[in-house]
């Protein structure tokens, strides 16, 4: 009896609670239930006791789906705009002015630090870089600006950044609410500049004017690669990002070297590099096999997690790169000579003198616009042609320059690839083209490009080279033969059939 009373009392209390709950709630009413959409699902409730099956969607016309999507997109954009989270043009200009003014301030600060250290003010530089949501273009009107201050190596964090630069910022009328966060994992200053919140961390350049020396080294490497025929990554050679990382690697390990020494060290380091050990700006490097094209000469992007720079390097193009590194090392290893002729190092590669036969590839199309698309598409597939020739026992040295055959009426681009036969073989260009076209026309896009465009291939000798190539085929007579670094490769070229 006592148990029945207890149970009954509990049930009564539950009923009372359920009755009073809606009265006690003071918040907004819940949203209305989503009404069923007519025609979206098969009608009719299930019979009693039957298992509920998943709804079967009914296909809507594509036009209806597109219209619904456009309407919802417009309403979403309007909602975002009305919510005030998209910055106005005036707000964008204000932020640009803030970044620009901070750049001027840190340049003046770098000169002041150099003067304090007894250095020439004109070799000390500083700059600012934006990152975070502002750099990505995803900021709102209330977002702060993440601005990285990059200063010279003579500017210390504790004194020059948190004391000298802070005093300069405090003296500016645009700056307010400035405070330092020195003990954080990323030390920074935080302040408002013209009412916009700025997070301002600091990083030092490794050397005075390191950025300028890095830029000069990279310019030298790009010129060297272009003159020596190593500058097209679609043909298995360097892309700009490859040379950038290699230059940064040298500068980082030899921050006080002159530009001349940096260039010499570039050849010294990478002619002796234990490939396939990846070149990485992050420590420590690891042995790994990259994706297709990256396993011969792997170069890592400076990101986390690490990724490989995309590459189309093959056995023959890798051989050409190593040969040119040997040549560059032979020419620059003696840094004591003051009368060095730089035209030797940057001489144009002598295709006409180095090879006895060439693969001539002509790409043509009815119109110039179609030709541009056609050339870009076929070049993106050139690695397959390189691999096919290598499988036949032929090494290739593709000249990246694009020539024009004026005897052909249609717009055209002509490529010449130097060939090195590693065994006796006769090339059937029609079969070679047929095999290559399988990779060119391997999808809808390729078939569309091939509809009105064409490829022709033929084997030619040096006399058939354009004058623009053949005129650059003679080395300077002043260049000593022992400095060429080509002895091993010459033996191969003399065996050309």
Image (cartoon, grey):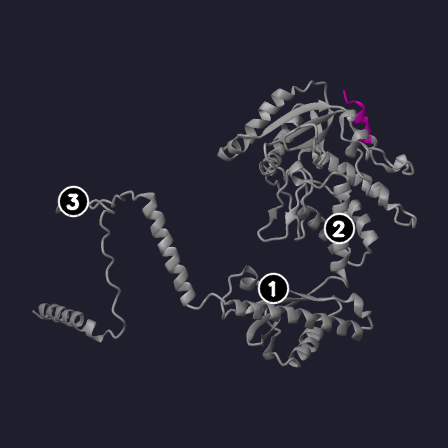
SS assignment at label 3: loop
Q: Find the magenta span and give its range.
A: 488-497
Residue reaching furthest front? 409
Dot 3 crowding, Cα within 10 Å, few <14, some 14–19, many 20+:
few
Sequence-wise first label, 1 or 2: 1
For residue 354, what is the image quadrant?
top right
- Tell me residue 336's x, y (percent): 91, 50
Determine the secondary structure under disc 2.
helix
Alpha-carbon distance for marks 3 and 2? 76 Å
The one nearer the camera, 92 or 115, is 92
Magenta portion: prevailing SS class:
helix
Q: Is residue 189 depicted above or below 56 in this figure?
A: below
Q: Where residue 227 is drawn, which disc sits there?
A: none
| Residue 455 painted magenta | no
Residue 19 versus residue 343: which sits nearer the camera? 343
**Residue 50 image label:** 3
**Pointer 1 residue:** 130
């Amino acid at each position: 009896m006592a148990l029945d009373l207890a149970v009954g009392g509990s049930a009564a209390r539950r009923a009372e609670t359920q009755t009073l709950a809606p009265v006690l709630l003071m918040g907004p009413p819940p949203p209305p239930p989503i009404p069923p959409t007519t025609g979206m699902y098969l009608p009719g409730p299930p019979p009693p006791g039957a298992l509920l099956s998943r709804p079967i969607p009914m296909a809507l016309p594509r036009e209806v789906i597109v219209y619904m999507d456009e309407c919802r997109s417009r309403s979403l954009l309007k909602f975002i705009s009305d919510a005030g989270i998209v910055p106005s043009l005036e707000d964008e200009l204000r932020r640009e002015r803030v970044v620009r003014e901070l750049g001027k301030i840190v340049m003046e600060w770098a000169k002041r630090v150099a003067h304090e250290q007894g250095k020439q003010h004109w070799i000390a530089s500083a700059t600012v870089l934006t990152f975070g949501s502002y750099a990505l273009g995803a900021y709102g009107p209330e977002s702060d600006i993440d601005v990285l201050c990059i200063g010279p190596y003579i500017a210390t964090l504790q004194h020059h950044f948190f004391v000298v630069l802070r005093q300069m910022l405090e003296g500016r009328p645009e700056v307010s609410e400035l405070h330092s966060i020195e003990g954080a994992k990323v030390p920074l200053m935080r302040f408002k500049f013209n009412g916009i919140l700025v997070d301002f961390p600091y990083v030092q350049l490794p050397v005075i004017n390191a950025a300028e020396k890095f830029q000069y080294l990279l310019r030298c490497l790009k010129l060297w690669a272009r003159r020596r025929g190593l500058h097209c990554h679609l043909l298995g050679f360097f892309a700009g990002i490859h040379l950038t990382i290699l230059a940064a690697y040298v500068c980082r390990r030899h921050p006080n070297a002159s530009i001349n020494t940096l260039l010499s060290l570039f050849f010294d380091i990478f002619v002796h590099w234990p490939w396939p050990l990846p070149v990485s700006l992050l420590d420590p490097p690891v042995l790994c096999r990259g994706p297709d094209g990256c396993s011969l000469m792997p170069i890592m992007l400076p990101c986390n997690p690490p990724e490989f720079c995309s590459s189309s390097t093959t056995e023959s193009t890798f051989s050409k790169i190593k040969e040119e590194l040997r040549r560059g090392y032979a020419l620059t290893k003696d840094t004591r000579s003051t009368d060095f002729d730089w035209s030797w190092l940057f001489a144009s590669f002598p295709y006409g003198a180095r090879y006895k036969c060439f693969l001539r590839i002509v790409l043509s199309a009815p119109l110039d616009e179609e030709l541009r698309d056609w050339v870009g598409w076929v070049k993106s597939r050139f690695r397959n042609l390189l691999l096919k020739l290598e499988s036949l026992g032929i090494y290739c040295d593709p000249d990246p320059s694009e020539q024009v055959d004026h005897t052909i009426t249609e717009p055209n681009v002509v490529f010449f690839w130097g060939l090195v036969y590693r065994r006796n073989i006769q090339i059937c260009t029609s079969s070679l083209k047929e095999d290559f076209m399988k990779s060119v026309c391997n999808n809808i896009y390729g078939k569309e490009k091939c509809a009105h465009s064409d490829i022709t291939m033929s084997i030619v000798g040096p006399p058939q080279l354009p004058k623009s190539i053949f005129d650059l085929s003679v080395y300077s007579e002043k260049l000593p033969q022992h400095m060429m670094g080509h002895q091993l490769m010459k033996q191969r070229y003399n065996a050309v059939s």
